Image: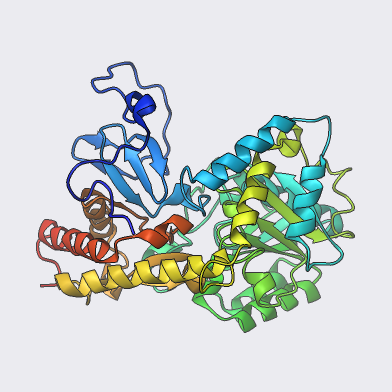
Amino acid sequence: MYELLGLGDGVRDFTDNRDKRRSVAPSGHTSEKRTVHSKITKKFKTESGQLVFHHGHGGEVQATDGTTYLDFVMGYGPVVLGHNTTSFTRAVAESLTNGVMMPGYTSFHEEYLDRLLADQPGRRGAFFKTASEAVTAALRLAAIETERRGVIRCGFIGWHDAQIADSLKWHDPLASPLRYKQKYTENMRGVGDSEPVLNWHDLSLETLEELIDTHRSTVGCLVIDAYQASMTTPELMRRAVDLARNAGLLTVFDETKTGGRISRLGYAADHGIDTDLIVIGKALANGAPLSMLVGSTEHLATAEKSRLSGTFSKEMLAVYAALATLDELETPRGEFADGWAELGAVGSQVASCIAAAAREAGAETLVSAQPVMGGAMFELTYAERLLGDRASRDALLDSFTDAGILLLEGHPSFVCGAHRDNDWDELTRRSAKAFTQWLTTTGGIGK
């Protein structure tokens, strides 16, 4: 069991002596900043400014100032084994001797699909780089099949125009006032009277039925972000899919956060939800860009004429990485049947430590932590009076960063296999320090 780096005395050298000169970026670098950042990349900062990262190892990342952080962001979910793990890196490096791009798909793509869909007879898969591309493909197929371009959306389903326009803060709880404020309401393409994108926001079947009935002539697809299922039951999700299908809509489960992380294909497959299409991504290749659109031969029959793939759909690096990731996750680990079961236990332990720290700091009436979908993800939970308090919630994220812990607020955080070696007592201690600092900086809120 290793200690959390950057939280005690000194900083670990990630490399041997030959490469020590590269382990920390040069200080005093004064060249012009050229990278355009978004809200996603600017979440993590200290008093000295935005964090820029240089190196990762296992469950930790190092910033250019030499500070090391315990990482529960995991690139927002794609890193599932850990950063720079020896067996994964070696396997990918060896595979690269076969090349990076061929004229068409390769035996490696076929092997990956055969293994991924081994218990899914009659299913096929289309390769993409990002899940937003895969969702776009699903929407295109739905429009072709139903001749209706409108979409009912439940959850965050991507950043392309018609996926994000008029969206909500989907990761907030149903009771949070922040959840229902519409965003991205101007200048987005692909949204209008003939092709509306509608929000099923409250997970009520009555609301979904009303949306379908009101827009029956224009809506052809229901897309559900699998994370939303953590707020309700599998039975309600089954009924929602049946309701949409009976109205002639194509149904899509977007398992971008969950597929490859909580299990091989994610929530819908685990719970027997008979959705037409599944999108999986993020955790498939331990950080390499890969996503899949999975469906029946019949539903994917129009893939060629609808131009679903592009040049880099057949790129091989991500598939090598996906095969190496699958090799590790399929392998039993001690008492656990496979890597997915271990991830669930690790994330549940992380949430338990953070919850214990909140109690220790006297913040338990305000905030806690809980595992999501078995524990491969976890999230902070808030008292009702803090649900709409954006400033206090952001301050808590900053306090955790100051304590050497990177996690997400208003979004589930993620664990990787390498977090199995966490020093749990140290995680609790540092989390308690973060909560104590937060209570102080917010003027003793809750005291």
- Residue 44: name its quadrant: top left
Q: Is residue 396 left or right of residue 87?
A: left
> Going by the picture, which residue comes out furthest to the top?
31
The relative height of residue 16 versus residue 219 in the rendered view (above or below) is: above
Residue 19: percent from left, percent from top: 38, 26
* The C terminus lies in quadrant: bottom left
- Residue 57: name its quadrant: top left
User: Is residue 173 something one can see in this rendering?
Assistant: no
The relative height of residue 158 versus residue 204 in the rendered view (above or below) is: above
The relative height of residue 314 versus residue 346 in the rendered view (above or below) is: above
Residue 83: percent from left, percent from top: 46, 45
User: Is residue 304 something one can see in this rendering?
Assistant: yes
- Is residue 416 or residue 75 the one in the foreground? 416
- Is residue 361 or residue 133 the one in the foreground? 361
Total numbered labels:
0
- Is residue 272 or residue 394 the one in the foreground? 272
- Is residue 16 or residue 261 the one in the foreground? 16
Residue 153: percent from left, percent from top: 62, 62
Q: What residue lies at 24% left-to-right and 35% top-to-bottom?
A: 49
> Going by the picture, which residue comes out furthest to the front?
17
Q: What residue lies at 24% left-to-right and 66% top-to-bottom?
A: 425
- Residue 33: name its quadrant: top left
Q: Is residue 276 left or right of residue 10?
A: right
The relative height of residue 230 versus residue 152 in the rendered view (above or below) is: below
Residue 262: percent from left, percent from top: 56, 66
> Going by the picture, which residue comes out furthest to the bottom?
235
* The N terminus lies in quadrant: bottom left
Q: What residue lies at 24% left-to-right and 58% top-to-bottom?
A: 396
The image's colouring method is rainbow
